[in-house]
Image (cartoon, rainbow, N blue to C red):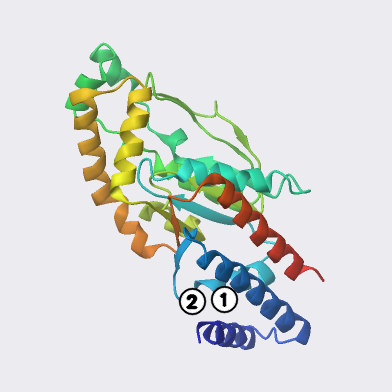
């Protein structure tokens, strides 16, 4: 029934836009079937990657691929700290890197857009414990220059290249236009804690949330903290702050995401699934 609803949606969309040629309809239906086939295979896995898809998203996505293929589109990938965002993004980027057209994609990271608070850190002699006592945090959207990030996303979508800021987590210093050159591309991937923040909603076309059980996030977070030399009370206090911030600023976006993905899936399967999906889409779109 769900597939029939998707087909009906596509047909109605084509009628509204006066794009009812047999060629266009056949391409849309071929693409819909190809994507549904890959999703059905994933669903049979012990640990599927795709946990849920928002009602109505799939046919809209297919229409975007077919009728708006000349337009640049942004994919926002968010989730709380240690949920598996970096693993997911690096896995799909490894697939995209093998595409013939190297200008097909580009990526931005929210971490590059933290505001410069180096003066505050210097005043407490570089002590992050004292820095946090002053009320500073890396886990609230106010800590980022979301206005600049939004502007950069809009520029990339409008075929304007940008240079991202360069942020140093050791000194809390931000240097504008000192980061990486980002070329405007058909697919723009934005990854980070606040990739689905309300201030970016108009610039993000496809919203993806990485969902991971709390106990796994906690285990990953403390393991990473220990590797960075942070243990004991300092780690406990920071994790408590991170968890409270996630509850307020990050987890609510799960309910508005177009796609919710499993943060417990291994990198090799993410690559396998992404490659299969990319192949299915490109084959379906061939004339």
Rendering coords of residue 201 (x, y %):
43, 58
Residue furthest to the right in view is 287
Q: Residue at x 73, y 63 (%)?
A: 282
Q: Nearer the viewer, residue 71 or 102?
A: 102
Q: Name the residue at 73% across, 82% down.
A: 26
Quarter-wise, where is residue 24 in the image?
bottom right
Residue 185 visible in this rendered orientation of the protein: yes
Instruction: Provide residue 30's location: percent of width, then percent of height.
Output: 70, 77
Q: Is residue 160 visible?
A: no
Mark 2 near mark 1, Cβ–Cβ under 8 Å? yes
Residue 247 screen position, x and y as percent: 24, 50
User: What secondary structure is found at the residue carrying circle 2?
Assistant: loop
Quadrant for the C terminus in the image: bottom right
Which residue is found at the position 45% from the left and 75% from the top? 55
Q: In the rendered image, which residue does mark 2 sit on? A: 56
Q: Which residue is mark 1?
A: 59
Up the image or down, 27 lies above or below 156; here it is: below
- Other-residue count near label 2 (Cα within 10 Å), few / some / many at <14 / 14–19 / ≥20: some
Q: Is residue 158 left or right of residue 209?
A: right
Q: Nearer the viewer, residue 43 or 254?
A: 43
Q: Quadrant of residue 134?
A: top left
7 or 141: nearer the eye?
A: 7
């Amino acid at each position: 029934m769900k597939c029939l609803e998707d087909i009906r949606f596509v047909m109605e969309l084509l009628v509204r836009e006066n794009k009812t040629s047999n060629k266009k309809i056949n391409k849309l239906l071929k693409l819909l079937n190809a994507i549904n086939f890959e999703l059905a295979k994933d669903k049979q896995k012990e640990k599927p990657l795709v946990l849920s898809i928002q009602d109505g998203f799939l046919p809209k996505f297919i229409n975007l691929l077919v009728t708006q293929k000349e337009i640049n589109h942004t994919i926002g990938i968010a989730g709380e700290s240690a949920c598996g965002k970096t693993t997911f993004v690096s896995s799909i980027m490894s697939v995209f890197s093998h595409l013939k057209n190297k200008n097909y994609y580009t990526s931005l990271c929210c971490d590059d857009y933290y505001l410069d608070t180096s003066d505050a850190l210097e005043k407490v002699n570089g002590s992050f414990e004292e820095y946090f006592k002053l009320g500073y945090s890396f886990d609230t959207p106010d800590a980022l220059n979301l206005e600049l990030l939004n502007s950069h996303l809009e520029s990339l979508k409008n075929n304007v290249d940008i240079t991202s800021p360069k942020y140093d987590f050791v000194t809390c210093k931000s240097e504008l236009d000192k980061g990486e050159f980002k070329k405007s591309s058909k697919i723009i991937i934005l990854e980070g804690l606040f990739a689905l923040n309300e201030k970016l909603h108009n610039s993000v076309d496809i919203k993806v949330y990485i969902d991971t059980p709390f106990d796994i996030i906690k285990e990953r977070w403390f393991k990473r903290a220990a590797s960075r030399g942070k243990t004991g009370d300092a780690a406990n206090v920071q994790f408590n702050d991170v968890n409270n911030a996630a509850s307020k600023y990050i987890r609510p976006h799960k309910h508005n995401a177009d796609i919710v993905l499993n943060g417990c899936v291994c990198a090799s399967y993410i690559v396998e699934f992404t490659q299969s999906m990319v192949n299915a889409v490109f084959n379906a779109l061939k004339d």
